Image (cartoon, grey):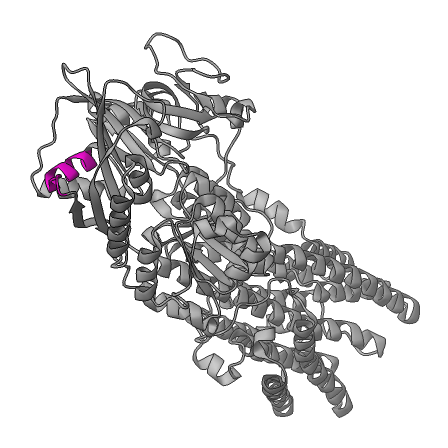
């Protein structure tokens, strides 16, 4: 028992931490400036820019070469900033996901970060927990440990108590008195003294690092990478075509190379990589602010597509803070005796909310518990016998006292009651459960021997305890949000059907009359269960194995399933669901490891907010990609078409870099910070099997880009017809392209809203980007040095009017196209 152990003082622990260091394995080094620089310069876009700089130097155009070099430095700086922002977001998630551990210090059980554990700390460990350090067992009950992570042994091994002499040895085999970092307690609980931490532990020696944040590529990233490779191939082919045309027809190979490189730069949408990386990492950080930790980054894109939420009642829908609301005892039993044996069947230093409520009730009623007794044995809870029994022995006595509590049907069966008494107590259980109470039964026994199982003990039934766990006030509104969003909510609980129905009624679940029990589920075939899960919303008295069957049945029906769980036996269901959600502090480590998300505060409404954020993140990614794709159409067209018609080059690499300075920040910052649409949670979930870049999305983006390209080409031909110089034509076309670019951004950033509304409701960052872009554009035209560098010229009144009017025409046509799309294509299909 914990009262046997005092542990270290905080001062002693702090001194040891200073000497030994943190209880953690060596971490991956953060990317430094040079590693970011090298990885950035490896990108195809930067290789092409460096080639352009070399060509300008070769041609003797040092101003253009230096300007292009300076622009490369600016883009590298932006890439560095974006990488740092992503790293900070992931570091914040890492900190939130840091494992915790219970230790005894100064005689008090405390919960501390596992990395702060030091040698000689006393660990308090129980079933389902990962062992945070190598330790020697001081006291244990029914303890078995899964050491497969270190030994490869598939079966859990039993443990014994340390004799304070045997030195720690390598893991392997049963009945060792040592625990090893990273292994998992499968049954029982214990107290253990820490021997080695961090790199000195067995897991540290073999260098097996366990990462809590999985930075794997998502489905979106994979799909967009393939799309980028296809465009890169297209860009390479067209680049060769342009170079050959210039070299053969115009006999100007150098200008041909510059035109070819410009075309390749214009086609290659490097922003896609930035969008995917930044949006998903910052999205995970934003979701964590809502109390939901993302352990698996790709889960974010699935989150918004959830069609079914399978939630536990306790701690998610309710507060998981129990209080005793009703006591029912036998005629020949007192309320005091009922509570006394209920306390004796509980642990003194417990974290279980039911046991805490029983202890508080006994304390409030000033019930005296006999102190001069020793805990001899524990019969643990199992799926076969859903009850626990503590065996006590009074000082100086040879008799054993058995205190049992558990599921009423189990305790009633163990007491071997008459049929009349059995019916009476089951009716009482049903009456209490119908008012929303969680019901436990209590029994006692005495004897001179310790039977192998609880079935062999001659119990006497004492009574029932009714506990209440209040519904969280935010849940009913969150349930309504789910209904409107096309998300079905299913309550899967181990509680009684009557209790589940009562709570379901309070939170506003649909179809609450049809309650399916675990017993009924166990008798159904997989096909029958598929039909039942399609209509039922309440599953009661469900054990973990049945949770897994329910998840698989929903998946077989084509649903995207999010499942909550907290126990070691919930791990299969969490792993099988599309999105496994562990329930914060009360989840076992193995449940957290099987889950994609961790609901830090356990609140159902936080989960619904996370789904809303998941939809927002996906929508913003899609809009950013649509905008990026749309704006690359006119850039590529203006780079390709003039050489084919013997027109002067409009765009050079420096112009592409200027456009990149606008497109990168606007797509990676402006779109990411855009708030969700008001109707985000009024739409049905998107279908997960649909491609991200489907034909409708490509059609929409290409038409938008085609409108801008048509106007810009019209400007080129019109100004040439009017006799404008090459530099004037370039200037007017570039102004039209930039202003149309801004219009396209506002057309895409708020989806179905009109451009004017999008501008008015834009965030501060979007307005700053727009203002900065227009300021830079004016600088390149009005400042002589920059004007010469960009091969621009001063514009007369006619030139200014053409630039402004053509831009307005382009933006107006984009808006008309938006209006047509509203009537002909569902916006949900695009956004």
Q: Residue at x 47, y 72 (%)?
A: 680
Q: Can residue 689 be seen in this snapshot?
A: yes
Q: Is residue 241 magenta?
A: no
Q: Seen from this angle, which residue lies furthest left?
A: 366
Residue 170 coordinates in the image, percent (x, y): 48, 15
Q: Is residue 632 left or right of residue 135?
A: right
Does the magenta stretch mainly form a helix, a strand or a loop?
helix
Residue 510 coordinates in the image, percent (x, y): 40, 68
Camera-nearest residue between 671 and 170? 170
Camera-nearest residue between 384 and 316? 384
Q: Is residue 339 magenta?
A: yes
Q: Residue at x 62, y 55 (%)?
A: 219
Query: Which quadrant of the rendered structure holds the C terminus?
Result: bottom right
Q: Quadrant of residue 791?
A: bottom right
Q: In this picture, is 6 found above or below 279?
A: above
Q: Residue at x 60, y 74 (%)?
A: 830
Residue 261 coordinates in the image, percent (x, y): 76, 62
Camera-nearest residue between 713 and 100? 100
Q: Is residue 673 left or right of residue 624?
A: left
Q: Can residue 279 be seen in this snapshot?
A: no
Q: Is residue 819 left or right of residue 292?
A: right
Q: Seen from this angle, which residue lies furthest right?
A: 248
Query: Which quadrant of the rendered structure holds the N terminus?
Result: top left
Q: Residue at x 39, y 49 (%)?
A: 541
Residue 382 coordinates in the image, percent (x, y): 39, 35
Marker count (numbered)? 0
Camera-nearest residue between 383 and 106? 383
Provide the residue span drawn in magenta.
331-343
Q: In this picture, is 640 found above or below 452?
A: below
């Amino acid at each position: 028992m914990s009262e046997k152990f005092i542990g270290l003082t905080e001062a002693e622990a702090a001194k040891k931490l200073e000497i030994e260091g943190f209880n953690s394995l060596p971490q991956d080094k953060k990317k430094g400036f040079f590693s970011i620089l090298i990885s950035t310069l490896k990108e195809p876009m930067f290789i092409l820019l460096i080639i352009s700089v070399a060509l300008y130097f070769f041609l003797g155009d040092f101003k253009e070469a230096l300007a292009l070099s300076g622009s490369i430095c600016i883009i590298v700086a932006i890439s560095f900033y974006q990488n740092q922002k992503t790293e900070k977001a992931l570091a914040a998630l890492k900190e939130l996901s840091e494992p915790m551990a219970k230790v005894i210090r100064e005689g008090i059980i405390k919960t501390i970060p596992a990395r702060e554990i030091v040698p000689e700390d006393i660990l308090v460990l129980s079933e389902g927990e990962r062992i945070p350090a190598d330790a020697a067992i001081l006291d244990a009950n029914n303890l078995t440990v899964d050491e497969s992570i270190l030994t490869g042994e598939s079966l859990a091994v039993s443990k014994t108590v340390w004799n304070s002499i045997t030195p720690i040895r390598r893991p392997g085999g049963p009945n060792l008195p040592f625990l090893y970092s990273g292994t998992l307690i499968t049954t029982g609980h214990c107290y253990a003294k820490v021997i080695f931490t961090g790199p000195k532990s067995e897991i540290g020696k073999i260098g097996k690092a366990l990462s809590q944040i999985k930075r794997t590529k998502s489905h979106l990233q994979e799909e967009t990478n393939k799309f980028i490779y296809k465009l890169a191939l297209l860009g390479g082919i067209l680049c060769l075509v342009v170079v050959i045309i210039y070299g053969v027809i115009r006999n100007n190979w150098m200008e041909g190379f510059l035109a070819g490189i410009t075309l390749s730069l214009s086609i290659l949408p490097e922003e896609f990589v930035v969008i995917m990386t930044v949006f998903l990492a910052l999205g995970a950080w934003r979701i964590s602010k809502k109390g939901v930790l993302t352990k698996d980054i790709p889960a974010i894109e699935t989150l918004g597509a959830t069609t079914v939420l399978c939630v536990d009642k306790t701690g998610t829908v309710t507060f998981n803070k129990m209080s005793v609301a009703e006591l029912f005892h036998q005629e020949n039993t007192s309320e005091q005796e009922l509570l006394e044996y209920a306390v004796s069947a509980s642990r003194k230093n417990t974290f279980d909310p039911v046991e805490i409520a029983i202890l508080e009730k006994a304390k409030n009623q000033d019930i005296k518990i006999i102190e001069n007794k020793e805990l001899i044995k524990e019969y643990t809870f199992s799926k076969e016998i859903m009850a626990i029994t503590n065996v006590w022995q009074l000082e100086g006595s040879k008799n054993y006292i058995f205190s049992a509590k558990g599921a009423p049907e189990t305790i009633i069966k163990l007491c071997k009651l008459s049929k009349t008494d059995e019916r009476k107590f089951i009716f009482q259980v049903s009456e209490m459960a119908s008012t929303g109470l969680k019901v436990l039964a209590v029994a006692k026994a005495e004897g001179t021997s310790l039977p192998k199982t609880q079935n062999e003990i001659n119990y006497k039934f004492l009574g029932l305890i009714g506990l209440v766990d209040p519904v969280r006030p935010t849940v009913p509104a969150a349930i309504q949000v789910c209904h409107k969003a096309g998300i079905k909510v299913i309550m899967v609980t181990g509680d009684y059907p009557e209790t589940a129905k009562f709570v379901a009624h309070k939170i506003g679940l649909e179809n609450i009359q049809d309650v399916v029990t675990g017993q009924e589920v166990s008798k159904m075939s997989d096909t029958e269960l598929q039909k039942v899960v399609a209509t039922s919303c309440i599953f009661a008295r469900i054990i973990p194995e049945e949770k897994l069957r329910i998840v698989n049945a929903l998946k077989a029906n084509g649903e995207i399933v999010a499942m909550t769980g907290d126990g070691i036996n919930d791990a299969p269901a969490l792993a099988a669901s599309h999105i496994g959600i562990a329930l914060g502090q009360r989840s076992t480590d193995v449940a957290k490891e099987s889950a994609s998300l961790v609901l830090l505060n356990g609140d159902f409404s936080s989960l619904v907010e996370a789904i809303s954020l998941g939809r927002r993140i996906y929508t913003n990614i899609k809009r950013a990609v649509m905008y990026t794709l749309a704006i690359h159409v006119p850039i590529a067209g203006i780079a390709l078409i003039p050489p084919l018609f013997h027109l002067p080059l409009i765009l050079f690499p420096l112009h592409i870099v200027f456009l990149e300075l606008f497109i990168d920040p606007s797509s990676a910052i402006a779109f990411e910070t855009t708030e969700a649409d008001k109707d985000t949670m009024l739409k049905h979930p998107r279908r997960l099997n649909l491609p991200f870049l489907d034909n409708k999305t490509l059609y929409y983006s290409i038409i938008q880009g085609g409108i801008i390209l048509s106007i810009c080409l019209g400007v080129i031909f019109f100004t040439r017809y009017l006799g404008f110089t090459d530099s004037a034509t370039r200037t007017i076309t570039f102004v039209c392209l930039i202003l149309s670019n801004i219009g396209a951004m506002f057309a895409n950033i708020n989806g179905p809203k009109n451009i004017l509304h999008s501008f008015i409701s834009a965030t501060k960052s979007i307005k700053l980007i727009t203002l900065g872009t227009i300021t830079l554009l004016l600088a390149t035209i009005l400042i002589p040095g920059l004007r010469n560098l960009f091969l621009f010229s001063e514009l007369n009144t006619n030139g200014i009017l053409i630039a402004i009017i053509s831009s307005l025409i382009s933006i107006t046509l984009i808006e008309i196209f938006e209006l047509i799309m509203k009537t002909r294509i569902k916006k949900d299909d695009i956004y």
